[in-house]
Amino acid sequence: MLTGQAYSQETSAAEQAEDVEVIAVKGIRGSLIRAQAVKMDNSSIVEAISAEDIGKLPDSSIAESLARLPGMAGERVGGRTSGISVRGFKEDFTGTSLNGRELIGIGDNRGVEYDLYPAEIMTGATIYKTTDASLLVQGIGGTVDLQTVRPLAAQETLTLTGVLEQGGNDSDNPEFDNNGHRYALSFVEKFADDKIGIALAIASTESPRNERKYGVWGYGENNGALLPSGLDSQAISRVLERDTISGIFQWRPNDDLDIVVDILDIDYSDSGVIRGFIEPFELDAASLNGSGANSTGTQINSNPVLRTDPAQKDGELSTYGLNLTYHLNDSWSVELDVADSESTKRDLRGESYSGLARNGAAIADADQRTRDFIMSPDGITFTDSNGLGAFADPTMLQLAGPQPWGGGMASLADQFATDALRADGENYNYINAQDGFLNYADFEEELTTMRLETFGLVDWGMVTKVNVGVAYSDRFKSKDNKGFFATASSYPDSQAIPADYLYNGLTDLTWAGMGYVVAYDGFAPYNDGEYTLNDAGLLEPDRLGDTYEINEEVTTLFAKFDFETEVGDFFVTGNIGAQYVQTDQSSTGYIGIVGSNFKVCDADNDGAIDADCLIDIEEDYSHFLPSFNLSVEVAENRYVRFAASKTISRARIDQMKASGFVKFDQNINLIAIPNNQEAVDEYGSPWSKFQGNPRLRPLEANNFDLSFENYFENEGYLSLALFYKDLVNWTRDGNQTIDFTNDVTNEGANYFIPGFHDRTVGADGLVGPDGTTYAAGTYLTPPDTGTFSFFEDGLTGSVKGAEMTAQVPLSMLADSLEGFGLAGSATFIDAELDDGTPIAGQSDRVYSLTAYYEMNGFEIRFAATKRSEYFTYERGGSNKIEEATRSAITQVDGQISYDFEGSGIEYLEGLRISLQGSNLTDEEEETRDENGLVTLRREFGPSYLLNFNYSFY
């Protein structure tokens, strides 16, 4: 891996990519020397990674390489580094391009999943921390430009790569293991007197991840102790399968014309199982010893749901591009670049429930279903259990939902009506009929881009180069959020797990004190028709309210002028320019509302969404974005750089959707809240409404950067960079109190439905939240008002930061230390939004340190990165985006390798062997609450890779 600063911004993006490949780099020391030379020659503030040739980056994906650069921090998803923050801004607020073209991903938003791109197809990446007018793919955090080879500028090669992978954690699930592999072929060849070049890279990956997840529903005071209200722990096994083809054809028929055609196709699958317990927690108060966060005791009335959740995420991304460059004369050239990218993804997760019996059936008494526990700030663990042996015996475990979770099927009450009686003497009904759930979301995205520009070498005083052009992009993105309630054919009875569903072995939950549990195929009852499915989209308004389309057309005019001069004894270079950006955006979606038939947007019961639920909103606006970059050599090999710019990051896709929904909480205590605003303000409301905002403007910042760089060796330098971002527009949460019987935000709609939103007090009576006593039979209606939540523009804030980087060859201290070196960086950020909310991706402190030795083909490297706590968001329940806070994390990676090029053994001269380890200290991801108690812990374990890389030429 090569770390350092990127290529001069005095050339185009395509020219920069070619400059990378013509300079061969051998070993980490060579890469550092090269990067230092690039940094010295650049008027902007950049970072870079590169390989000596196609297929030579050492990591399994470009994400792992990026995460070690100064000012950058990786975010793990499922144990793999996938997201990248630049200067504290998550990838959704960072522009990402491939060879200068805007790049799409297969996720929920704009951010790219960097682990989608295998290292074998990349020759490097440039990270722009300051922008200029020719950089069309921008973000407030910066721009990451991924680069593939240009064959006519590269060395000819045929390289094979083979990697064997082993996870440090054995799989707790019997149908998975911890072994993986990666194979790749890289080929570059030139023909027709070097007028035609072809580059081809093919890579196939199978990579396991085994995770132990501890979770709770939250903690509360319980007889003087802090104990969980519910349990949520699973053994998770997943396998990433990724097949990639990258092809580049370059034709230079004469010195004036250069034609490049490139394609990239990635097939991506991430499949696995999430298997474990989810259940309420009830304490035997008499057994409790201790108080606060430290206690022991017994859980009683344990009635766990064994969740077997098979997961299957499949995606495909294809990109096609054409680049034409024509030199009009020795001074002027024109360039045309067109590209089209498409991606699709289905994120599927099934839920299959099993337990002691169907909810409502007779089971053992509460004191015969117990677990002994130990509670500490690190969470709750169990030491013994009683009455739960069925979970390890497939002949006793029942394929049915043990908890009454079927309330969402109220409109299907007739379907589940039965004469069969529950243990309490009441009839089984829809409440008892949920035995599973099938979630999936389909995503589609297409981006078409066109860029026409001219470059000119001029002699206009200080101005030496001109770059003027126009660009156009057309983006479409859609999400279809689907879900289905599942009911087993045995309802209202239950049956044991069918033998043909079973895997050979049990799942190990002993690490949580929960013993061994039955392992079966959670997709099987969906595939063979055992489950009857009912469309949740017609039953859950928030699911329909998360289905949408986004369209975006952007036209950009830009001009950049490069200059150089001498001021006194100082050599000064830089550029000044601006962009004018015109945007037309729109969104189509649905407002999910429950109708009088208790269904969502299906008033005529035809199973189709009613036309009056459809909503379409559009908006247009423009921006003027100036930029200025200045570099001054104040002394020999000492530089001061200054940059000022205005940049934008477009609003999150999930926040721009037109869709929304109206929800109602059926909790009778909320329905009993008095119908006045004072009571609603104090006790809340069962009503709520949410809607996205297609009129959101981009996030906007005024940026100022200052850096000082001192180069004291070919392989050594010190730098200090200061940056300030004045956030003049940021998206914020908006709230408005509305009358749900006369919604002024939806043409006076009345959402109240008699028989659905009201309630009659039961035989035991009720004491309302305000202390009012209601006798049995009292008719209750909810308060009229509640909260409408949405997104709006107008939030402001600021980000102040400092980056310190040092690259020190230890041979400076003694000749005996030749080959040893250190490269480290520290980033400190103080970010503040005016309403006190955090910025997604922002850690206050990020550190990176690499220690290395390289000599005569032998290389060893250890790298550690540390980031402090940060706020983020992730995929949550019902396929929606949820906020999350990640605790501080330190990751240590290592690599030892030997390159046989100088070994003197002829047939081994193309061979390089390396052994890599990541997450060597088995770092866990933890989230703690305000009392310091762990609410979520994920343990992934280390992973090890044995790499064989052989170049035939």
Image (cartoon, grey):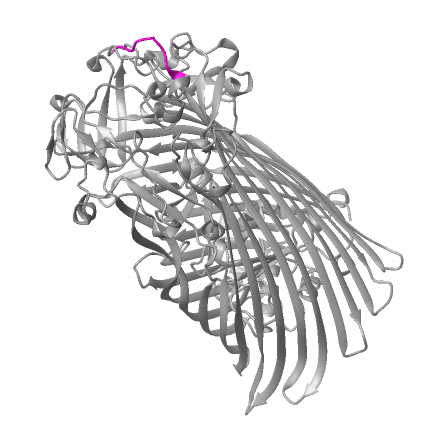
Per the picture, the main secondary structure of the magenta-coloured stretch is: loop
Magenta part of the chain: 416-423
Residue 417 within the segment the image draws in magenta: yes
Residue 655 in percent (x, y) is at: 45, 51
The image shows a total of numbered marks equal to 0
Residue at horizontal 37 percent and vertical 42 percent from the top: 662
Residue 924 in percent (x, y) is at: 38, 40
Locate residue 774 relative to residue 883 in the image: left or right.
left
Foreground pick, 487 / 764 = 764
Foreground pick, 832 / 539 = 539
Residue at horizontal 34 percent and vertical 47 percent from the top: 887
- Residue 9 visible in the picture: no
Foreground pick, 588 / 18 = 588
Foreground pick, 39 / 694 = 694
Locate residue 617 relative to residue 198 in the image: left or right.
left
Residue 915 within the segment the image draws in magenta: no
Residue 779 in percent (x, y) is at: 19, 30
Q: Quadrant of residue 466?
A: bottom right
Residue at horizontal 41 percent and vertical 47 percent from the top: 873
Residue 541 in percent (x, y) is at: 41, 37
Q: Is residue 559 above or below residue 504?
A: below
Q: Quadrant of residue 218?
A: top left
Q: Quadrant of residue 424?
A: top left
